[in-house]
Amino acid sequence: MTDFILSGARIAGYTGPVDIAVARGCIAAIAPSIPGDTQVEAYGGWVFPGYVDAHIHLDKAHILDRCDMTQGGLAHAVEQTARAKAAFTTEDVYARASLVVDAAVSYGTTALRTFVEVDPRVGLRSLDALLALRDNCRHRITIQICAFAQEGITNELETLTLLIQAMERGADLVGGCPYRDPDPVAHIAHIFDLAERFDCDADFHIDFDLDPENSDLPVLIAATEARGWGGRVVAGHASKLSAMAPMDVAAMTARLRDAGIGVVALPATDLFLMGREADRLQPRGVAPLATMHKAGVRCAVASNNILNPFTPYGDANLVRMANLFANVANLSTDEDLRTCFAMISGDAAAMIGLPHSLAVGAPATMVLLAAPNPAMAVRTLAEARMGWIHGRPTFDRPPPQLHTR
């Protein structure tokens, strides 16, 4: 028994429109024409398994009203957020994070990896909120939770205990921030110790500056190789790469590729925070993912923050991030824009270890875009029209009604 047929869809691997039959939450058939009574018209729009946000902070979203925004820069953002999170409650975090999840779902995101800060200021309150949100939203979106040491570890050893407790409570992976620790090498080692103990992935905020020297990436690469953790490590920001000479970028790119470390750029945040010291020709400060992707590095583009001192704007719409990255990286060909689209969909899913395909027998997790292909979706910031998780509808955004008289 077919639940419904999505008719006239364009999908990867097919040259023309196809029908997609859904039964019992899975894709039952894909063919040029499938007869049936319950037809949902796709009007030639692109259908795919949804956007994947590989790096977002649900716990500290929507806190602009609690922060001083008269200054700027990374140090100020960290200071303001640290002050604000001391007053976070579980209920408060749940409510704010829910706003972002609702928006993300409405824009076609079907999975995300969120960091959650655990340290002596906030304890496990934010974690408890996101654990509850993850469970309550399973029917709408897949949420991975990364227990994250934003403020360092060697300077606050209580954080190490909290990270262990977070993993025992149900966090999916661990994350570190070596640039905030007096001993970045030890910080990285602590995170890998936890990753080994809990057999989980590790995700780092790293090299978040524009000094081409003193990179922590070589330490991360060496640790990944020594621990045999290739394919299970992600480096976020890595804006230092944008300041390196081409030869140095090529050498680091090859090492990241060979070590199996993925790189996520956060263009909204990286552009906002980096390069403030320049009085002209302000640097962009975004990792050169286009070049790195061509060299074989796993790459993704993601949101990072929504409406806080790190990123005082945002709506959880990932195609906006892909479009922004394409502009910053001077990308224009269809091939390049398809790559940008992959960085917020299939490539991002692979980076965080999630399946992402439309095939017979696969879950009917699908999003319909108002564009005929991925390149046009990025070019036009195509709206997400409808979405399903395992065949269940998650949102519906009809086209606007134009009044010509």
Image (tube, helix red, strand yellow):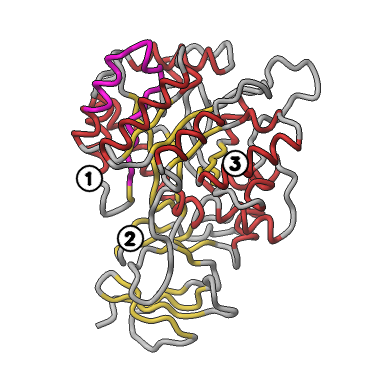
Give the camera-side residue of 83 and 180: 180
Q: Position of residue 218 (x, y in %)?
A: 56, 31
Q: Are marks 3 and 1 in contact (CB under 8 Å)?
A: no
Q: In the rendered view, does 357 fall on the left or right side of 161?
A: right
**Label 2: which secondary element:** strand
Residue indicated by mark 1: 136
Q: Position of residue 233 (x, y in %)?
A: 44, 41
Q: Are marks 3 and 2 in contact (CB under 8 Å)?
A: no
Looking at this rendering, what residue extends furthest in the front direction? 226
Give the camera-side residue of 3 and 201: 201
Label 3 or label 1, whichever comes before in sequence order: 1
The residues tagged by marks 2 and 1 sit, at their Cα atoms, a distance apart of 14 Å
Give the camera-side residue of 153 and 68: 153
* Amino acid under disc 2: Ile
The residues tagged by marks 3 and 1 sit, at their Cα atoms, a distance apart of 40 Å
Q: Quadrant of residue 402?
A: bottom right
Image quarter in which the N terminus is found = bottom left
* Amino acid under disc 3: Arg
* Amino acid under disc 1: Asn
Residue 167 visible to the viewer: yes
Image quarter in which the C terminus is found = bottom right
In the picture, the disc for residue 371 is: none
Vertical placement of 327 versus 62: above or below? Answer: below
Q: In the rendered view, does 73 fall on the left or right side of 21?
A: right
- Magenta residues span 143-164
Residue indicated by mark 2: 389
Residue indicated by mark 3: 255
**Label 1: which secondary element:** helix
Give the camera-side residue of 216 and 17: 216
Q: Residues within 10 Å of mark 2 (few under 14, many from 20)?
A: many
